[in-house]
Image (cartoon, rainbow, N blue to C red):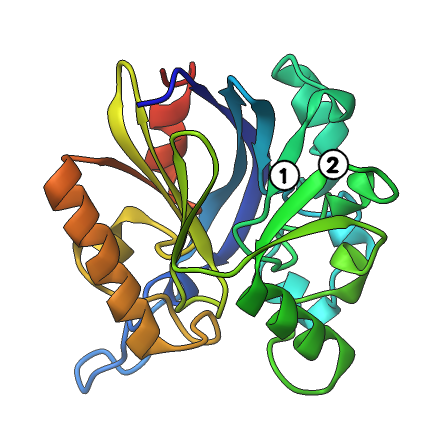
């Protein structure tokens, strides 16, 4: 158990086809060959962990110029972060009572453009940026070649940053907080596990599940959002086992219910 507090940062909304979020959500059939597209809005959110050793920021959200040509047009067309300009990291930290200068460490769950877009704020500083080895390698491979995943933008993370590399399946870099390697959505996706005095065991699952349905109904993320479906199911079992053994409370990467349950903070 660690005497910490988790505070959410609401970073705006992304509008997308639900089929991207849940694989095969709406499929055509003989009786309904042209089903209507269902567009939904999901939150982008980060959290601040007030820990005895450090003020830790989990992810840095989207770049505020996402809708002004910073994101590739085809990606913004599919995943419209229409209010990113209203949610610069500095501003959202300020609304929650923090500042860039008060952040002692950053943990990047992964380096996709809606999670790493605020890293420029830490360029040239000594603030440690924790990222999994597999994630950093794949992000550079994707951003610097014509291979890999187009959701990595070199301009998000190719800065003078104080990288701290996570290598294992489960590592601890702050007392009472475990970094969990949860590959599937990306090769180096990480989640967090900690036990709080009042809430008990907490699992921050990140984009292993965009929304609760991915996890509860065991339905993977949709097309283009999975690096490896086999690894995704393995990571799902890892979280399910922890939830069962620890009676853990889970929070998912873009889930409205998760953000709602975080409001007011957790202890």
Residue 33 numbered tag: none
Residue at (61% x, 55% y) in the render? 80
Residue 114 drawn at (x, y percent): 61, 52
Above or below residue 88? Residue 217 is: below
Tell me: 192 left or right of 59. Answer: left
Q: Which mark is residue 106?
A: 1
Side (left or right) of 189 relative to 27: right
- Residue in the picture at 50% in, 64% down: 188
Q: What is the C-alpha distance between the residues marked 2 and 1? A: 7 Å
Q: Mark 1: which secondary structure?
A: strand
Mark 2 Cα shell of 10 Å, populated few (<14), some (14-19), many (≥20): some
The x and y percentages for residue 90 are: 75, 28
- Nearer to the camera, 249 or 95: 249
Residue 82: in sight, yes or no?
Answer: no
Seen from the viewer's position, the closer of residues 49 and 87 is 49
Which quarter of the figure is the C terminus placed in?
top left
Residue 264 seen in the figure: yes
Q: 144 or 32: nearer the eye?
A: 144
Query: Where is residue 205 shown, x and y percent of the image?
Result: 36, 47
What residue does disc 2 label?
127
Labels 2 and 1 touching (C-beta < 8 A)? yes
Residue at 33% from the left image edge and 35% from the top image edge: 257
Within 10 Å of disc 1 (Cα), the crowding (few <14, some 14-19, many 20+) is: many
Residue at the left extreme of this rendering = 244
Considering only order in the chain, which callout, 1 or 2, is on the residue closer to the N terminus?
1
Q: Quadrant of the N terminus?
A: top left
Residue for point 74% across, 61% down: 71
């Amino acid at each position: 158990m660690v005497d910490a507090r988790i505070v959410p940062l609401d970073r705006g909304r992304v509008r997308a086809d639900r089929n991207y979020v849940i694989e095969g959500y709406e499929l055509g059939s003989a009786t309904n060959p042209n089903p209507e597209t269902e567009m939904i809005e999901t939150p982008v959110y980060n959290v601040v962990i007030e820990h005895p050793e450090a003020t830790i920021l989990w992810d840095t959200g989207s770049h505020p110029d996402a809708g002004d040509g910073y994101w590739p047009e085809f990606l913004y067309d599919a995943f419209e972060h229409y209010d990113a300009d209203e949610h610069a990291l500095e501003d959202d930290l300020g609304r929650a009572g923090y500042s860039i200068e008060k952040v002692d460490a950053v943990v990047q769950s992964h380096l996709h453009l809606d999670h790493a877009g605020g890293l420029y704020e830490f360029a040239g500083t000594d603030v440690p940026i924790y990222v999994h080895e597999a994630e950093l390698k794949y992000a550079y491979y994707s951003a610097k070649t014509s291979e890999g995943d187009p959701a990595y933008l070199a301009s998000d993370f190719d800065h003078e940053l104080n990288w701290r590399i996570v290598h294992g399946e489960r590592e601890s870099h702050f007392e009472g907080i475990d970094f969990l390697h949860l590959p599937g959505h990306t090769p180096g996706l990480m989640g967090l596990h900690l036990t709080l005095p009042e809430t008990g065991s907490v699992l921050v699952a990140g984009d292993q599940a965009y929304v609760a349905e991915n996890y509860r109904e065991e339905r993977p993320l949709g097309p283009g959002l999975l690096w490896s479906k086999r690894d995704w199911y393995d990571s799902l079992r890892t979280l399910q086992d922890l939830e069962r053994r620890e009676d853990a409370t889970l929070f998912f990467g873009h889930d409205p219910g998760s953000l709602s349950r975080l409001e007011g903070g957790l202890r």
